Image: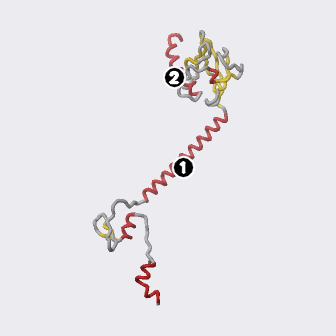
Amino acid sequence: MWHEHAAVLAEFIGNSDRHIVAELDGAGVIVDSSVGFSRLLGRNDKPVGTPFYELFADERSDRRSGLPQVGYLVARARPPSIPSRLEAQAIRSGEKLLVVAEQVHVEQNVVEQLARLNDEMTNLTRQLHKDKAELERSIARIKRLEGLIAICSYCHRIRNETQSWQRLEEYLTDHSDALFSHGLCPECEAKYFGDLVEE
């Protein structure tokens, strides 16, 4: 019965990111693997052509090359993959070997680090939204003066959008957040009120 659906089953497992399966040739080189196997290694591609023991260190037999032993296999993923421990069954199929994972244990410090990074990302996202809202409020408050402004050479009044002449202070107040207070510069004080200051 299984033989009738072997191709469909192989395609399902190969495309599944939940099933961790690798097919090795007689020399222990990966000839095919599931999406889940690549994900375990932190890769987007299948590691076809890579010897199994370049990616994993066998914890039980200390084997470093060739085919894993048939039966129960415990292997630790080598850097730069995600630090994890693979518990699998190595099943012989002709001259090839099928490695089917039973369990994958991601190292606890990696889980803690991922949780911490997730918290930091959440806090940064909140702060980013807060800063964005503040920036949008600031932009809404800013009124800009730009372009060519017509100003009278004598009285310094400005021609506004309605083509009427407006005092400089009024124009700037209408078109910006500037406020004015009035005083006298030393030259004007001397020119207009000099005789009062001398008395």
Query: Dots 1 and 2: beta carbons under 8 Å?
Result: no
Question: Mark 1 vs mark 2: which is more N-terminal?
Answer: 2
Q: Residue at x 58, y 29 (%)?
A: 42
Q: Amino acid at mark 1?
A: Gln
Q: Residue 186 placed where, x, y %?
A: 45, 78
| Farthest residue, direction right | 61
Return the residue nearer the eye: 128 or 155: 155
Q: Which residue is mark 1?
A: 127
Q: Is residue 8 above or below residue 164?
A: above
**Tag 2: residue type?**
Asn
Q: Is residue 177 above or below residue 9?
A: below
* Whole-percent x, y for residue 72 in the image: 67, 18
The disc label shown at residue 15, or none: 2
Query: Which residue does the image show at 37% across and 66% down from the upper left?
Result: 174
Looking at the rendered structure, which numbered label has been put on residue 181? none
Q: Is residue 172 left or right of residue 59?
A: left
Query: In 3D space, how far apart are the residues under numbered discs 1 and 2 (Cα atoms)?
Result: 39 Å
- Please tell me which residue lies in front, 141 or 43: 43
User: Which residue occupies 61% across, 37% down?
Assistant: 114
Residue 59, horizontal then vertical, whole percent: 70, 23
Q: Secondary structure at mark 2?
A: helix
Answer few, some or many: residues within 10 Å of disc 2's Cα (few below 14, many 20 plus, some between 14 and 19).
few
> Residue 195 versus residue 89: which sits nearer the camera?
195
Residue under the image location 55 percent in, 18 percent down: 32
